[in-house]
Image (spheres, helix red, strand yellow):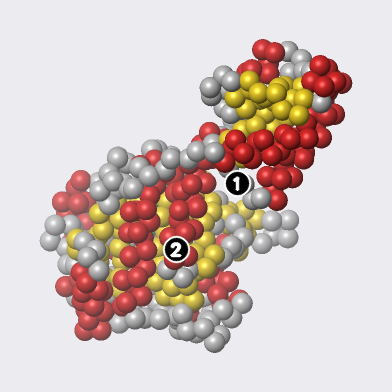
Amino acid sequence: MFKTLKGMQDFLPEEMGFWKEMETKIHRIVSIYGYQEIRTPLLEETELFARSIGASTDVVEMEMFSFEDQGGTSMTLRPEATASVIRAYLEHHMGHGNPLVKVYCMGPMFRHERPQKGRFRQFHQINLEAIGLSDPWVDVEVIEVLMKICEGLGIPEPKLFLNSVGDRKCRPSYREKLVTYLRSKKDNLCQNCIRRTETNPLRVFDCKVESCQAALTKAPLIIDDLCSECLKHFEQVKAGLTELGIHFDIHPRLVRGLNYYTRTAFEVTGSGLGSQNAVGGGGRYDGLAQELGGEETPAIGFAMGLERLRLIAKNLNPSLPLNILFLPLESNTVLIAQKLSQELRKQVFAQDLQKISVDLYTGSQSVKSALRYANKKDSHYTVLLGSEEEKRKIASIKDLRDGKQHEVPFSELTSWFFKHVKS
Ligand code: AMP
């Protein structure tokens, strides 16, 4: 028997109701803020991710699903969406005549990580980007949307952590200081961090190894080394959040995994997730568009993991559609059952009744199997059609909730259902 690949999962029909409701709520919240949906391919040139995320990040070094296609081009299943969105923004000149492009996308991402609770190799994200302005109010709005999603889904105890990681002006000198410090602590660092000291020193803050964390207690912090512009930006973001009543904690060691962040960096955690408790995070990435060959374009965005949201969201209560099940009891009544169900579906469709499904089960010569099917579909009504019913042109309807039977002429079936279903 074949099985799903490690770190990948099937979403069965029982689960999909929750996902659809979650996605619908998210679509609604972000569109209220004026964000429009964009969809980009799952496959991109490997170089796009290497250039944007940074060649020395864990994602690019170890976690990408990459392969060469038949023409020898190295391709990668997207590990995140921002690089693709900026690629699309530049490719389609979306910024021409539009000073602020507000877009979002939802879909699967792929990272070759060690699977555990809340961590998969194929997972889904809502990814939101505001491209074009460096204004701190945009940062505030983006963070507000993230918090609204948490609120709308009922994420327990969402906590917002905020930091500034500086920009091209102030980060290089800070980086030097940090590298000097880390080299002096080399004997206490794990092998990974010794390597990171030279390739991607800020990432050392993310190391989970205790001795590394202990070695970092006196490490210089970027927040103490911000240039005046970055500091001003940070103060304005904090003031804006406070103004909106959004509580946050400053987390001076929050650096986030991807290289492209500048200035504002943030993360939100929720309770009930265990060690993988980040439900989302993001930041400003003012240099990315230029890195990808475009003009300098300030931008900010976030990504939230849908699996993690689904695991802890309290406000998801999907209801099944009301199911009307046609059961031809003999093979010679299948045709009439088909016709009647088709007519009913046509009307359901015409009246746009989203919450009704009209089902036909042709295995009902065996009553047991018919009942099993009705049970599985949680049917509300069965419409029994035997030879007797066909002869009298009357359907026997059973309301499975109250057990009552009704005899309804074929010609009145649709209006009968509409009357009963609406009441
Ligand atoms: P990142 O793109 O790494 O900033 O991650 C943003 C969010 O995506 C995280 O806060 C998680 O909720 C989610 N996420 C990231 N990686 C995984 C993964 N391997 N499995 C499930 N969710 C993930």
Q: The residue under label 2 is which amino acid type?
A: Val
Foreground pick, 81 / 183: 81
| Quarter containing the C terminus | top right
Residue in view at x 62 percent, y 39 percent: 419
Residue 384's tag is: none
Q: Of the residues tagged 1 and 2, which is closer to the observer? A: 1
Q: Residue drawn at (59%, 81%), measured in percent from left and top?
A: 93
Residue appearing at x 40%, y 63% in the figure: 302
**Mark earlier in primary sequence (1, 2):** 2
* Residue 235 seen: yes
Tell me the quadrant of the picture where the N terminus can be found.
Answer: top right
Would the CB of label 2 be found within 8 Å of ligand 1? no
Residue that mark 2 sits on: 30
Q: Quadrant of residue 343?
A: top right
In the picture of the structure, the residue carrying the numbered disc 1 is: 354
Residue flagged by tag 1: what amino acid is it?
Gln
Which residue is nearer to you in this view: 111 or 273? Answer: 273
Q: Secondary structure at mark 1?
A: loop
Describe residue 308's horizontal placement relative to residue 203 as left or right.
Answer: right
Q: Position of residue 231 (x, y in %)?
A: 21, 79
Is the residue 62 above or below the residue 344 in the image? Answer: below
The answer as to whether callout 1 falls within 8 Å of ligand 1 is no
The front one of 206 and 305 is 305
Residue 264 x, y percent position in the rendering: 30, 70
